[in-house]
Amino acid sequence: MFHRIRRRAAEPSEMQRRFVELSARLEGQVPPEVERLRAEPQRTEPAPVVDDFLPPELRVLSHDQLDGRMTSWKQPLVLDGEMVACAACGAYRDWLILSTRDQIWLRCRSGHQQQETRLDTAWYNRHTGPVDATHATFEDCLRHLGH
């Protein structure tokens, strides 16, 4: 009994035979739509020029057009297991972090500034959010951040 089932499975079914015959007949043929598209000349009209860029008042300056960027850092800043403190007054929280010319500067609430060589621009970019405002002067930015 199993011998007959195996022998029947070894032979192609009627559907398989019809599929092979049909695909052999259609092998060299191309659909008429393709021939029609090939015969039509391709029109190459120039694309219309559309000014779809943002208006100037909505554009954000790129990093090379800015003198620097600044963000507030309320919590203590810990680098290499050491809490950073202001060299002048000893403050250890509520920093402003300034990123300018590939340098990072820390500014305490009292206005003392010190360069932090353990931080770089990549660190600044990872730990800050998107720009929410741009300012014409350093003092305007300090006022915006509440310092």
Image (cartoon, rainbow, N blue to C red):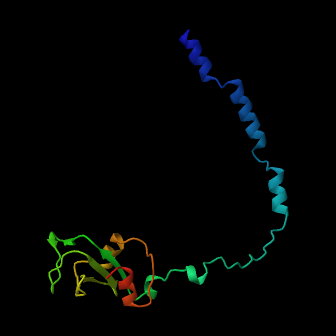
Choose top left, top right, bottom left or bottom right for residue 35.
bottom right
Choose top left, top right, bottom left or bottom right for residue 111.
bottom left
Locate residue 80 relative to residue 143 in the image: left or right.
Answer: left
Count the marks: 0
Choose top left, top right, bottom left or bottom right for residue 131.
bottom left
Tell me which residue sits at (34%, 77%) in the image: 71
114 to 18, vertically: above or below? below
Q: Residue furthest top?
A: 1
Q: Where is residue 129 in the image (x, y as percent from the top left)?
A: 39, 70
In what quadrant of the picture does the N terminus appear? top right
Tell me which residue sits at (43%, 87%) in the image: 66
Tell me which residue sits at (75%, 34%) in the image: 21
- In the foreground, 75 or 9: 75
In what quadrant of the picture does the C terminus appear? bottom left
31 to 126, vertically: above or below? above
- In the foreground, 129 or 147: 147
Locate residue 15 relative to residue 110 in the image: left or right.
Answer: right
Q: Where is residue 74 in the image (x, y as percent from the top left)?
A: 27, 72
Q: Where is residue 98 in the image (x, y as percent from the top left)?
A: 32, 82
Locate residue 28 relative to residue 64 in the image: left or right.
Answer: right
Q: Position of residue 29 (x, y in %)?
A: 79, 48
- In the foreground, 130 or 108: 108
